[in-house]
Amino acid sequence: MLVQVNWTNNRYDYVNDYMLDSLIEAGVVARFLRSTGWVTVGVDPIRSANHPRMYNGPERRMFGECNTQ
């Protein structure tokens, strides 16, 4: 699938979706287009293959116990 990108030199192009993560990591993509609109790298939240999502909230899971009531 092709994704529209806005390069850091302010030109527009299309790239294969599997290339997008590496191009963002390389710092050559300023923005890319999602179905919901333009995403600005460094401003809007994006997934990263190198940085797994971390949850900073309180732990609510009950490991090793069955919570039956």
Image (tube, grey):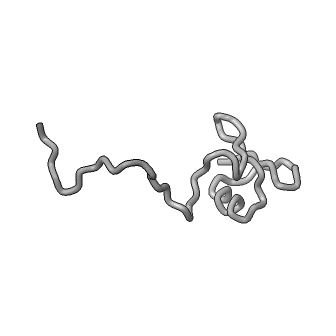
In this rendering, is residue 68 above or below 55?
Answer: above
**32 left or right of 7 in image:** left
**51 left or right of 23 in image:** left
Where's residue 12, x and y in %? 84, 47
**11 left or right of 69 in image:** right
Going 23% across and 51% down the picture, which residue do you hit? 62
Image quarter of residue 23: bottom right
Where's residue 2, x and y in %? 69, 48
Going 63% across and 57% down the picture, which residue do you hit? 18
Q: Nearer the viewer, residue 18 or 47?
A: 47
Q: Residue furthest top?
A: 36
Going 70% across and 43% down the picture, which residue do you hit? 39
Where's residue 51, x and y in %? 54, 62
Q: Nearer the viewer, residue 45 or 19?
A: 45
Q: Nearer the viewer, residue 68 or 22?
A: 68
Going 42% across and 48% down the picture, which residue do you hit? 57
Where's residue 45, x and y in %? 61, 47
